Amino acid sequence: MKGKRGNFKYAYNMQSAVDSETGLICAITISQSPTDHYELPSIVTKAINNIGKKPEYVSADTIYLQNPNVSFLIEQKINGLIPNRT
């Protein structure tokens, strides 16, 4: 993965989906993407497949507030709780 200073290193980006009621991990994905910007659809899809149903809400931090992620949540009819930078 390319690091912040432009150098390449052995590194991975991990995403996890956790059920807010039980605290149980529903899904984990590993990629070599240097940022989290576009990782939301893959982790949500994996969580849906693992638990067998769509969540009513998905909560994520500011970095996930990207058009492809928002479009994915709208298409899936999932309410996204993603704050903006302000």
Image (cartoon, rainbow, N blue to C red):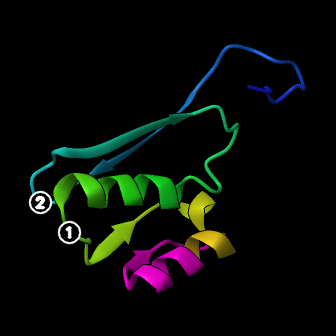
Classify 10 Å Cα crowding around label 2: few (below 14), some (14-19), many (20 and above): few
Q: Residue at x 61, y 48 (%)?
A: 36
Q: Residue at x 74, y 14 (%)?
A: 9
Give left or right: position of 64 versus 57. Answer: right
Residue 61: image location, x then y, percent: 50, 59
Residue 79 part of the magenta segment: yes
Report the amino acid beneath label 1: Lys
Judging from the image, what secondary structure is the residue with disc 2 in? Answer: loop
Q: Residue at x 26, y 78 (%)?
A: 56
Residue under numbered circle 2? 21
Q: Height in image: 83 above or below 19?
A: below
Residue 74: image location, x then y, percent: 48, 85
Q: Residue at x 67, y 44 (%)?
A: 35
Residue 29 — which label? none
Give left or right: position of 74 versus 67. Answer: left
Q: Residue 13 lies in what quarter of the image? A: top right
Q: Nearer the viewer, mark 1 or mark 2?
A: 1
Closer to the camera in the image, 43 or 22: 43
Q: Residue 8 lies in what quarter of the image? A: top right
Which portion, as a residue range, is magenta? 71-86
Q: Height in image: 79 above or below 4?
A: below
Judging from the image, what secondary structure is the residue with disc 1 in? Answer: loop
Q: Height in image: 7 above or below 26?
A: above
Q: Earlier in the sequence, mark 1 or mark 2?
A: 2
Q: CA distance from mark 1 to mark 2?
A: 15 Å
State the quadrant of the C terminus: bottom right
Label 2 near label 1: C-beta < 8 Å?
Answer: no
Residue 39: image location, x then y, percent: 56, 52
Residue 53 — which label? 1
